[in-house]
Amino acid sequence: MKNPVMPYILIFAFGIVAMFLISFKGLGDAEQLAAEKEGKGEKQEETAAASPEEIYKKSCIGCHGDQYQGGVGPALTGVGDRLSKDEIADIVTNGKGTMPPGLVPADKAGDMAAWLAEIK
């Protein structure tokens, strides 16, 4: 005779095992996230050492285009004719409209503004 409770017991046992496996997986992920968080300072150092063109390729190209033609963000060709270097530095540091702040480190804002002002 078959016991009608047996499938429920098996499901219960598999559920308990699955819960422990997922918990251990989460612990591994937490350690990986902590290691990435510690390494975040290295990424900031890389950005601080990057040239304006490298910063543009990493942070700006998605919205302003690969040829500075614009897209989600405005076109950057001739931006030096429309805005002063100080205004450009303020925008790349603090953002404007839908552009978020912090994409360009404050210490690189002047270099970035000078580079952008020269785009024709």
Image (cartoon, rainbow, N blue to C red):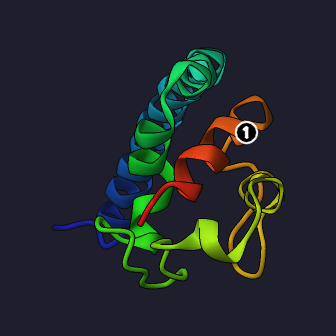
Q: Is residue 23 left or right of residue 100?
A: left
Relative horizontal placement of residue 27, taking residue 1 as reference (left or right): right
In the picture of the structure, the residue carrying the numbered disc 1 is 110
Q: Nearer the viewer, residue 11 or 101?
A: 101
Residue name at image x 77 percent, y 29 percent: 107
Question: 83 or 101: which is nearer to us?
Answer: 83
Please indicate whether residue 5 sits to the left or right of residue 115 in the image: left
Q: Is residue 95 above or below residue 39?
A: below
Total tally of numbered discs in the picture: 1
Name above or below for residue 68 compared with residue 114.
below
Q: Residue flagged by tag 1: what amino acid is it?
A: Gly
Specify few, some or many for label 1: CA neighbours under 10 Å numbering under 14, 14-19, or 20 or more.
many
The percent position of residue 86, horizontal first and vertical second, equals 83, 54
Residue 34 seen in render? no
Q: Quadrant of the C terminus?
A: bottom left
Residue 63 locus on image (x, y percent): 47, 73
Q: Position of residue 7 (x, y in %)?
A: 30, 65
Which residue is depicted at the point 58% across and 57% down?
117
Q: Which residue sits at x=19%, y=67%?
A: 2
In the rendered image of this protein, does residue 85 appear above or below residue 66?
above
